[in-house]
Image (cartoon, rainbow, N blue to C red):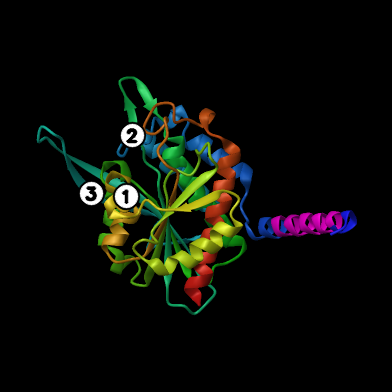
Amino acid sequence: MGKYQKTLLSMIAAVVALTSTVAYAETVTFDRDTATATIKILSADEMAGRRTGTEGSAKAQAYLLGRIAELNVDMVGPTHEHKFKFTTESQDGTKSDFIGNNLLFRIEGTGDTDKTIVVSAHYDHLGARDGEIFNGADDNASGVAGVLAVAEHFKAQPPKNDVIFALFDAEEMGLQGAVAFVRNIERIDPKIAFNINFDMLSRSDKNELYVAGAFHRPELNAVIDEIAEKAPVKLLKGHDDPELGINDWTFSSDHGPFHRADVPFLYFGVEDHPHYHRPSDEFETVPVEFFLRSLETVVMAASMVDEKLAN
């Protein structure tokens, strides 16, 4: 091959790559500045770590309800707020009663699919301990930003299936918000057929994001591979095989109760890092560019799952 031909092929390849990138960017619709503001606001000191039942949690709920109102979306039932009671028991046997509050909203699908997707993330975190605030920027203000980004996208480009968006409370206290939701799943929506869950989307030095769920549903491998081909991050399958022990994430976040109820799931999240469940998990330490690429990936994934589920 001559030098001219090589140069021409390189130019064509560059144009194709650029066209593909532009086309991909046009398919993902959410405001990057708003997403960045979401993680920053939810992980601010004034939210005091968003522990269930605290003033910080109430502030986070007020902020999120304002964001939901701005989206102009439907309620799930008579209100966006779905309160639930639960009891925890400490190591010394002391029992404590709590009231959690799941925040739910819906976007109706344009197709006649008779299926509903739940896109979820938990908004609570650990609160304050020994005078230090655990702000939970990655865990899980980032996941909440992911849910809201998917909602923005589906408002602009309506889904084919109905989509319920669930911001769960009390995940850090035993997945209590998701447990309460699934316990009432028939009343909430008997058509629920899939869960997409986000937990920790904003930190990876390797530009890596994991997706779990295909081990339990091998038919999901094809759609994951298609997402991975177009994703602006390195999307890796794994962390869903029971033989992995503590590295099996099947029941580690809010997708777990859905799996127990035989609802297929895809869970997106990064691996543990030095900031995990530490006071240093705050906005100032978040690699924002990776966070935004991660959000682009999960928005594209939600859109693709919606497309495949409708067929």
Taking depth in this image into account, of 302 and 243 the one nearest to the observer is 243
Residue farthest to the left? 93
The residue singled out by tag 1 in the image is 248
In percent of width and height, residue 178 lies at 31, 54
In percent of width and height, residue 33 lies at 63, 42
- How far apart marks 3 and 1 lie (CA) works out to 28 Å
Query: Helix, strand, or loop for circle 1?
Result: loop
Residue 66 seen in render: no
The residue singled out by tag 3 in the image is 85
Query: Helix, strand, or loop for circle 2?
Result: loop
Q: How many marks?
A: 3
**Three-letter residue code for mark 3:** Lys
Mark 3 and mark 1 residues within 8 Å of each other at the beta carbon? no
Taking depth in this image into account, of 19 and 97 the one nearest to the observer is 19
- Magenta span: 6-21
Image quarter for residue 271? top left
